[in-house]
Image (cartoon, rainbow, N blue to C red):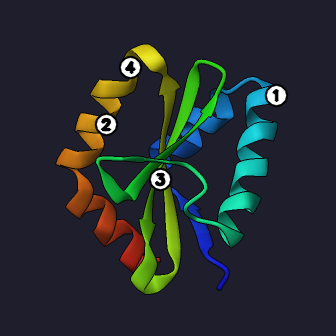
Amino acid sequence: MAYAVYETETFSRLYEAMEKAEQDWVDTIKFQLIENPNAGKPLKFEWFREKRFGDKRIYYLIYKNISRILLVSFGSKKDQQKIINHILENKERYKKIIESV
């Protein structure tokens, strides 16, 4: 079953600020996730994953019950723990966002 991929406003702003190579990689990952949402490395939970590009990572949430993926953030390895903590603290807000689209 194909998944629909969405992004938060924050992710969209980060995408616009990325270098061209990073944007191309993110576009490739979006297509990959449509067919295989479990492509990335799980982060503490099956529904919370990351994909790595050099020293940067894309963070996303999987909503299997509605076949949707939410791209949440993109950042460097040094910001990884801060980003993970933020996403976990705001997971209910992200759930409301994905259910409203």
Residue at image mark 1 = 20
Residue at numbered disc 3? 8
Label 4 neighbour load within 10 Å: few <14, some 14-19, many 20+: few
Quickly name the residue at label 2.
Answer: 84
Q: Residue at x 65, y 62 (%)?
A: 33
35 left or right of 28 in image: left
x and y percentages locating residue 7 in the rendered image: 54, 56
Mark drawn on residue 79: 4
Residue 27 pos. (x, y %): 76, 49
Task: Name the element at disc 2.
Answer: helix
Callout 3 touching callout 1 (CB < 8 Å): no
Dot 1 and dot 4 residues touching (CB under 8 Å): no
Mark earlier in primary sequence (1, 4): 1
Residue at image location 57% in from the left, 24% down from the top: 56
Q: Earlier in the sequence, mark 2 or mark 1?
A: 1
Q: Which is more N-terminal, label 4 or label 2?
A: 4
